[in-house]
Image (cartoon, rainbow, N blue to C red):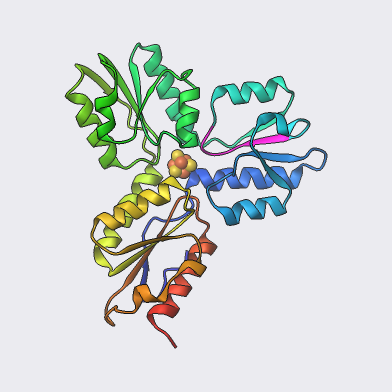
Amino acid sequence: MREGTGRVKVAEAAGFCFGVQRALEMALEKARAESRKPVYALGPLIHNNQVVGQLEDMGVRVVKSVSEALGGVLIIRAHGVPESIIKEAEALGIEVADTTCPFVKRVHERARELRAEGYDLVIVGERDHPEVAGIMGWVDGQAHIVERPEDVAKLPPLRRVGIVAQTTQTEDNLADCVRELLSRCREIRICNTLCDATVQRQSAAAELARKVAVMVVVGGYHSGNTRRLAEICSATGTPTYHIETARDVNPDWFRDLAPSDIAGVTAGASTPDWTTQEVIEAIERAVSPA
Ligand code: SF4
């Protein structure tokens, strides 16, 4: 990704992560290669409307249920799905192209191991996020979801707790939830399933936010990892704006910047570089009007 001029700095790690890039390449390859069968994606392949639109232009149709993909190829997205979905597709004779990120697969495996070893499983993550629904599905729904430390008080009594985390959670939230659980149970086993790409993007975003006058976070409004980047930047005290595209850049945000002030940019794991670059250019025009 282009660096930006002296007035706009981009976080050292930002934008497409390994898992999203891989899922997109696999889906594009399937769409190009498949001439006999229609190609479907179970839910938007990534949380980015622009990329989903591009895939649709290439013939990849988004469906909500497995049965809608009868006779075609069904792409499973990087977030993963419950095991029952894969079995349902196989039972219906639907070809599956599974792009589940290997780091998400690792969470499924850890969750199953903890259950097999008799731990009460706790998932630290967003209740309504597809990745968390997928993890739940690999342990037959036998897990408790904790979004924030406050949720721990609502759990039933637990003796031996095994913890996994949604890959894009923050280290702080995971640590706070673990601390809360420590006060309630005698034995805890933690599998730190945060993915490196997430940890790097979050720390790079915080580092940049501390140095700049305004932070702009680019990514889908439905993207959990982008929302968390915005929360992290905002927590540094720097005014932070979460936007989807260059059209959302408001020149008023930069009006009061001193000539030496810098604007910072970061982007979620499902934000394509070209979207971020258009945003950088829009901010450059706003901070240095012709
Ligand atoms: S954020 Fe991490 S776990 Fe999620 S798709 Fe990207 S690399 Fe995989």
**Magenta stretch, residue numbers:** 73-80
- Furthest toward the left, the residue is 183
Q: What is the x, y in percent for residue 154?
A: 28, 25
Quick check: can you spot residue 201?
Answer: no
Q: Nearer the viewer, residue 168 or 241?
A: 241
- Work out whether residue 153 or residue 272 is closer to the camera in this orientation and state it: 153
Q: Is residue 167 above or below residue 123?
A: below
Asked whether, in this view, residue 3 is left or right of residue 157, the answer is right
Number of numbered tags placed on the structure image: 0
Magenta span has 76? yes
Q: Look at the picture and state if 277 lies above or below 189.
A: below
Q: In this view, does 92 lie to the left or right of 226?
A: right
Percent position (x, y) of residue 108? Answer: 46, 26
Q: Position of residue 232 (x, y in %)?
A: 30, 52
Give the image quarter of residue 69: top right
- Outermost residue toward the front in this view: 154
Is residue 254 rendered magenta in the image?
Answer: no
- Residue at 65% of width from left, 40% of height from top? 41
Could you tell me which residue is drawn at 65 percent across and 55 percent down? 54
Query: Residue at the location (29% across, 22% down)?
Result: 155
Q: Which residue is drawn at 49% across and 53% down?
A: 220
Give 169 or 126, whichever is nearer the viewer. Answer: 126
**Which of the 4 image quadrants contains residue 194?**
top left
Asked if 228 appears above or below 123 in the picture, the reply is below
**Which of the 4 image quadrants contains residue 251?**
bottom left
Q: Position of residue 105 (x, y in %)?
A: 48, 30
